[in-house]
Amino acid sequence: MRARTSLLPALAFLSLAACAPLSPPPYSQISQAASAVSLAESEGAHTAAPLELAAAREKLSSAKLAAQRGDNLAALQLAEQAKVDADLAQAKARTARSQRAAEDLRAEIRALQEEMERKTPR
């Protein structure tokens, strides 16, 4: 009987420890994901990468909800995925902007070449 009563506090502690969250709330990762989404939006991802931006927003929202529920592991994973999606959206937006700039330069070069051909005597 004595062995059972000495185990009772240990079992109570272990059962409480099992209920406690194993990881801290991922506030930093959620903040980083939110910043990445904002940056992607400011880079024009809404037109260049709308699917990736929408995925990032959805995962960020889900990460916040998971953190509120205390599901810290899910919140962490969703926040990290949201950041990756936002980074991809930002990269696609920058690529699209660079491609437009390159096409504008090619058009200017063509125009200058045509003008030079018109002005050169034959």
Image (tube, rainbow, N blue to C red):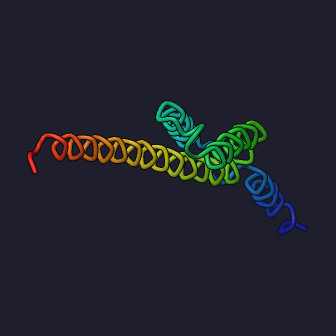
In the foreground, 42 or 74:
42
Q: Is residue 52 left or right of residue 121?
A: right
The answer to which image quadrant residue 115 occupies is top left
Q: How many marks?
A: 0
Residue 105 x %, y %:
29, 43
Q: Is residue 52 left or right of residue 61?
A: left
Residue found at the very far left of the displayed protein:
121
Residue 101 x %, y %:
35, 42
Q: Is 42 placed above or below 70 here?
A: above
Q: Is 42 placed above or below 24 here?
A: above
Residue 93 x %, y %:
48, 44
Q: Residue at x 30, y 48 (%)?
A: 106
Q: Is residue 106 left or right of residue 100?
A: left
In the foreground, 80 or 116:
116
Q: Residue at x 85, y 66 (%)?
A: 2
In the foreground, 57 or 89:
89
Residue found at the very far right of the displayed protein:
1
**Which quadrant is home to the N terminus?**
bottom right
Residue 118 x %, y %:
19, 42
Residue found at the very far front of the displayed protein:
122
Q: Residue at x 50, y 39 (%)?
A: 36
